[in-house]
Amino acid sequence: MSKNLYDNVCEEKLFAELFKKHAQELHNFIYYKYGEHISPRDKVQEAFIKLWDNCKKVPLQKTKSFLFTIANNLSLNQLKHDKVKLKFQQEDHKNYTNQSPEFILEEKEYLQKYQKALANLTEPQRVAFLLNRVEGKKHKEIAALLGISRKAVEKRIYGALEKLRKEIEGI
Amino acid sequence: MKNKVGIFDFKVLYIYRNFVMKEKDLIRKWLDNALTDEELKAFKKLDAYDSYIKISDTSKKILPPSYDVTEELNEIQQHISQRTVSKNKSYLGILLRIAAVFVLGLGVYFFFANQDTQVNTLAGQKVNFELPDQTKVQLNALSEIVYNKKGWENNREVHLEGEAYFKVAKGKKFDVHTPLGVVTVLGTEFNVNQREGYFEVICYEGLVSVSYQQNTYRLPPGKGIELLSKKINEINTQDTTPSWIENKSIFKSKPYYLVLGELERQYDVVISSKNIDQHLLFTGNFVHSDIQMALESITIPMGLKYEINENLVTLYKQ
């Protein structure tokens, strides 16, 4: 068994490294899962503070799962079971000056439908799908992150895609 | 049966399966960015290709709220360092609190440990209790015992005012201090009565030694001494316990004021007895349960009458 350089994360430098490594990912994960109204930023902060408080008890290899579990639990505590509403990036219209108003309107409608369809996905489906599509994560990575099999991830993402398509196109 | 169908059928099945599964597999592979060039071409030929691409492209427009890792890290580091400081403070605070509790506890302990335990009775009240070594004490009305629990085993000492009956547990010497003398015993039963210049010790079991002024008297069971008008008299008794334990006061040739005093204590009354010679000797008894009967018991032999007015009793000659 290889010996770990650090037994725990009670080292400010190491803590900072861990933060840089995981904070963004954790933030986005919480966002995809619960939306913005639970303020994922705060959840990340709280999770890392918990990590710092328990730095002696948490081995380095387990910090990531510790952080994700804590942030998830904190979010669940607060969750008011609202529909998750994810925001879209505003198009920079300057680049599309020659677009017809019809096209812009259609695009707007499409986005609305999309948002609604996204909210209607089950939570596991949405999380897996967004991690895959938005973050560009491989199925294997998502499987590791969620602690499920690769096959299950594939199923969730595919299911999400089909559901989105059917709902958006009104099939 | 299936073996007989042959390789050909199996191949058809395979091709069919391949055809059906193809679309799903292609999409799944596409989702994992794992399509080969050939498969990509096939994927592009799918009917729903456009909508898949659009969905995928649109999903990329979903924007998690901007998250500045460096800034967030600064914030959390600031928070943690602040908290560490305040935590240190609170550690000190907790330490101080613990120290304060200890100091207080010790203070209270010493205060009470060094404090004497006091047991007293009101008029008309009798109390049974035990000393730390299980010595049994019965305290008659309007009496007081003071002792100190600390080091009791080595220093069995009580201070008594009034009257009490002791059943002393075996052990080292047991002292009863009264304003008039010291009674010292080993394990025994005895009664000490000290009231209004009267001092009486009666031994019921064991051996009791009484020091009065410079003299020491040793009392075997059934013997007692009394100090009356500064004179020491010996007492003999057949009783095994003092009479007041059985809610009765028995007097043998006692000055009348002692009788009245005891009645006052047992019934919580005040007796006014003008023009009556209180030094006359009285022999007789009264009960502690019925004031009428008790008063009759002590007035009739003396040729007196009584009147009760609330808790004031007036005695007068007939």
Image (cartoon, coloured by chain):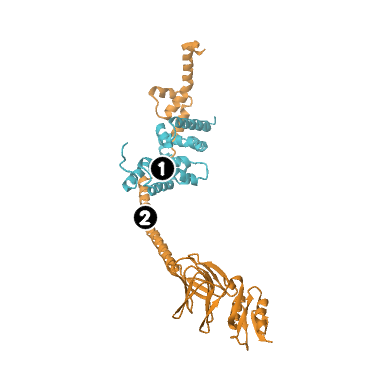
Chain colours: A cyan, B orange
- For the N terminus of chain A, which image quadrant? top left
Residue found farthest to the right: B318
Q: What amino acid does circle 1 point to?
A: Phe
The spot of residue B10 in percent (x, y) is 47, 14
Numbered-mark total: 2
The reply, left or right, for residue B26 in relation to residue B297 is left
- Please tell me whether mark 2 or mark 1 is closer to you in this view: 1
Quarter containing the C terminus of chain A: top right
Q: Chain of mark 1?
A: A
Graded by Cα atoms within 10 Å as few (under 14), some (14 to 19) or many (20 or more), the crowding at tag 2 reads few
**Cβ atoms under marks 2 and 1 closer than 8 Å:** no
Q: Nearer the viewer, residue B218 or A92?
A: B218
The span from disc 2 to disc 1 (Cα, nearest Å) is: 24 Å
Question: Percent x, y for residue A134?
Answer: 42, 36
Q: Which mark is residue A99?
A: none
- Do discs 2 and 1 belong to a common subunit? no
Q: Is residue B280 above or below residue B247?
A: below
Residue in the image at 59% along x and 75% along y: B123
Dot 1 falls on a residue whose secondary structure is helix
Labelled disc at residue B82 = 2
**Of B76 and A67, the residue lying toward us:** A67
Quadrant in which residue A30 is drawn? top left
Task: Using the rendered image of the protein, determine whether residue A33 is visible from the camera's viewpoint.
Answer: yes
Q: Which image quadrant is residue A32 in?
A: top left
Image spot of residue B113 (x, y percent): 44, 67
Q: Which residue is mark 1?
A: A66
Q: Secondary structure at mark 2?
A: helix
Q: Is residue A123 above or below residue B305?
A: above
Eyeballing the image, is B44 above or below B129? above
Q: Measuring from the top left, give residue A16's x and y in whole percent.
A: 34, 46
For the residue marked with disc 2, what is the amino acid?
Answer: Gln
Viewer-proximal residue among B127 and B22: B127
